[in-house]
Image: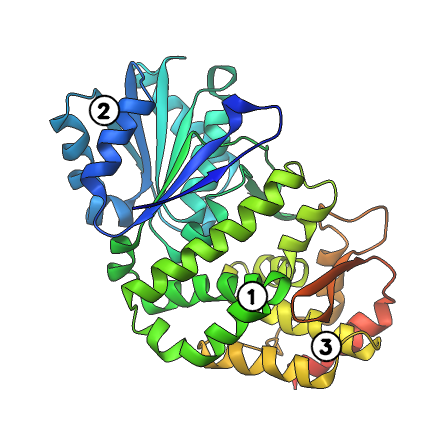
Amino acid sequence: MRTVKVNLDRKCSSSYDIYIGKDIMDRMTLLIAKNHKAGRYVVITDHVVSQLYGKKFITALKDIGLHVSLIEFPAGESSKNINTVMDITGKLIETGADRETCLIALGGGVVGDMAGFVASVFMRSVPYIQVPTTLVAQVDSSIGGKTGVDLAYGKNLIGTFYQPGAVFANVSFLETLPEKEFNNGLAEMIKYGIIDDEKMFRTLEDNMDTIKSRDSKMLLNLIESCCRIKKSVVEIDEKEQGLRRILNFGHTLGHALEALSQYTITHGEGVSIGMVGAARIAERMGYLKSSETARIENLICHAGLPVKIPKSLDTEKIIAHLKMDKKRKGDVIHFVMLKKIGMPFINGNIEQKLIAAVIEEMKK
């Protein structure tokens, strides 16, 4: 089992370990019991993950003498709302949860966001642990302490920064992941290669078929690489005041497309299209070579992810959603741009007519 330490400056109590391995259920439960003592544990998951792993995980925790219960909610982005938060909170009270309770998020990005948000506000905060079961969550969303709830106006408009006590990435969970969900995680992997590590980007280019076959050794190496990139950024900028914003490459346009499509476009699909859009904007502004844009688009296609915007989505409505992005300043839309693969920067000086032109181009 590999370990990556997230060291948050002057906040020893907020620092934590990311554990990465295959078939680590037994070691995971022992580490939870040893390092995260609590009066009771409540596993929060969705109904799909609950059927696959809920009973097995609960049994493993009970077998080592822990007092544990489970709360589940309907799977999917549509559950990521304030009503589900209230429902989970009510069930916590019914189970007898108090300030000595530790929550465990067992699931993908939605579960992690919801459990983390509830942990940050329930009884004015209780500890929680991330046990990500999807590739998106293992390489990205379980790390860094971002929590969020969607509103009708857009994604994650209510949320907190609240760090987990630990993250356990068990590659074995990925064996049951549907192909579409696995591809969503590949989008985040590609993002990390684009913004930080051209060598990793080449590894993805050269080995995509092996990765898509879910080769465990390849996945362990790539997941660890992504975790190390993200932890390095989070250590410098925990609250997204500067550098951490580069992690949003592809997300500005991607989130708008997700919300406008009522989440029929998945997170990974939105980010993939958003990365292509950001690359094309950077190319049109003279920052990025066309050959680099082509490499990005070709890799995204090879991963089985989309590079075009559905014609049914209205360009003006997409731009209106961009203006509601929580990272904007006033009416200025900030995009993470590229000078080359591995060299990102933030640009808030992009004309709306250029954004609109690229959106229209990507519908063809």
Tally of marks: 3
- Between the C-alphas of marks 1 and 3, the distance is 17 Å
Q: Which residue is mark 3?
A: 280
Q: Residues within 10 Å of mark 3 (few under 14, many from 20)?
A: many
Q: Residues within 10 Å of mark 1 (few under 14, many from 20)?
A: many
Residue 68, labelled with which disc? 2
Secondary element at tag 3: helix
- From this view, report whether residue 140 is shown above or below residue 127: below
Task: Say which amino acid is labelled 1.
Answer: Gly
Task: Say which amino acid is labelled 3.
Answer: Arg
Task: Say which amino acid is labelled 2.
Answer: Val
Secondary element at tag 1: helix
Q: Is residue 133 left or right of residue 140?
A: left
Which label sits in the foreground, 1 or 2?
1
Residue 205, how many percent across, how many down? 49, 78
The residue drawn where x is 74% and y is 65% is 337
Q: Is residue 62 left or right of residue 203?
A: left
Residue 193, labelled with which disc? 1
Residue 324, labelled with which disc? none
- Between the C-alphas of marks 1 and 2, the distance is 39 Å
Residue 334, how many percent across, how many down? 78, 56
Q: Considering the image in quadrants, where does the C terminus appear?
A: bottom right
- Depth check: give the residue in front, 201 or 310: 201
Which label sits in the foreground, 1 or 3?
1
Q: Earlier in the sequence, mark 1 or mark 3?
A: 1
